[in-house]
Image (cartoon, helix red, strand yellow):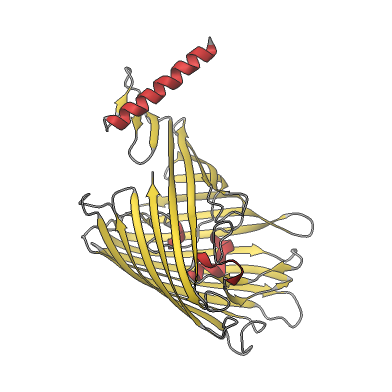
Amino acid sequence: MIRKHLAGFVASALALAVSAQAFAGTVTTDGADLMIKTKGGLEVGTTDKQFSFKVGGRLQADYSTFDGFYTKDGDNADAAYFRRAFLELGGVAYGDWAWQINYDFSHNAGSESDGYFDEASIAYNGFSPVQIKVGRFDPEFGLEKATSSKWVTAQERNAAYDMVGWANGSENGMGLQVSGSAMDSLYGSAGVFAKDTNDEDGESVKQFNLRGVFAPMHEAGNVLHFGVNYAQRDLNDVENYDSSVKSRLGIRGVVTNGGNDAGTNGNRLVLGGHKGNWGDDKAFGLEAAAAFGPFSIQGEYISRTLDSKDAGVDDLEGDGYYAQVAYTLTGEARGYKLGKFDSIKPADKAIGAWEVFYRYDYLTMEDDSVGIDPSDDVEGKVHNIGVNWYVNDSVKLSGVYVKSSVDNAENTAGDDDGDGMVFRAQYVF
């Protein structure tokens, strides 16, 4: 009997979903207490907003081709891979509680055999506008990181983030974060995280993150944004920690964790770091952005200092920045939510929205143990010129030309610059 009722419920739910797909809009029950939406995924919720459930996701298929410094021998290589393949489940329970589970099946940021949880969190919103979140999620550090990977302008975030991967993601772990907004223009967050790096006693390394944003202008096409970030962790009790810092310089296909890549011929820039004994690790960041109609400009500055505990070994220090300009040829403005940019919504569904952009990335680290000449610091510079076609609210096609150059480093063929192109087809639901 129970199985019969369950089968009937499932059949009814499927019928409602099919009806919603066939006749766009809102479907309610006889009691007008249930609502189903199919635009942008499948969402089922009560009309009093006390309970909801949503299924969504994103698929990003990339192809890249590159040569010069991007390969060890300087010859051309290419890569085709899923950059992300997310299944996203989220919802609200009892009004004040929210949950989110995002799993990436692409293996690109996981391993050859496993995907990874991009997020698995529970949040309490009963103290609105303050939110308390706990679980697996990336720490907040930087404007581009705060912006979803679906809607960042270039396919890959700026190369300067490669210096501080621990500060805004890259490692598994759990965290607790308190965030909130005030006066429609202020946003702040503070979090503590236990990462998967352990000390000699097996205790996880703790990390603290702070982010503050002031946005006196905060509407799409009318944005003025300033932000500051700080992150710190203690590596004093971690033996023989590998602090190596490498950068793909904007070409993910050089090496992926589970997708197709350049194989053993892929080459990354080694900026500094090595296995040793270290102390405090600190990262600091500034961010600024503005948008006026279809035009937007943004940039960030990032610095990092890692204290050395080994005799005769200098501290590891680095800094970097990027500057980006973008213009929507069809006139649409980039979306903006307090603290981050959002998607571009095409005004004309027949031609979509067309965006062009340019971004310059720079990063350097001071480490006498790497580089051709120990007296000179290794530097990386990347030019990104690209175009995005927002076909509709779900489909985005992108292409970018990447030109990089490095100082005080080269591949085995003696190249100190490289060229590449990256193409992406994205579907969001």
Residue at image coords 76%, 66%: 239
Q: Is residue 19 above or below residue 260?
A: above
Residue drawn at 59 percent across, 66 percent down: 263
314 left or right, relative to 4: right
Asked whether 426 or 292 is in front, the reply is 426
Picture quadrant of residue 63: bottom left
Residue lying farthest to the right in this orientation: 201
Which residue is located at x 42 percent, y 57 percent?
147
The part of the image, by quadrant, that contains residue 355 is bottom left
Q: Quadrant of the C terminus?
A: top left
Residue closest to the far top = 1
Picture coordinates of residue 181, whole percent (x, y): 41, 51
Residue 282 screen position, x and y as percent: 59, 68
Answer yes or no: is residue 73 visible: yes
231 horizontally vs 225: left or right = right
As drawn, 81 above or below 239 = above
Q: Position of residue 333 (x, y in %)?
A: 26, 58
Residue 213: x, y in percent? 41, 60
In this rendered view, identify the residue nearer to me: 4 or 190. Answer: 4
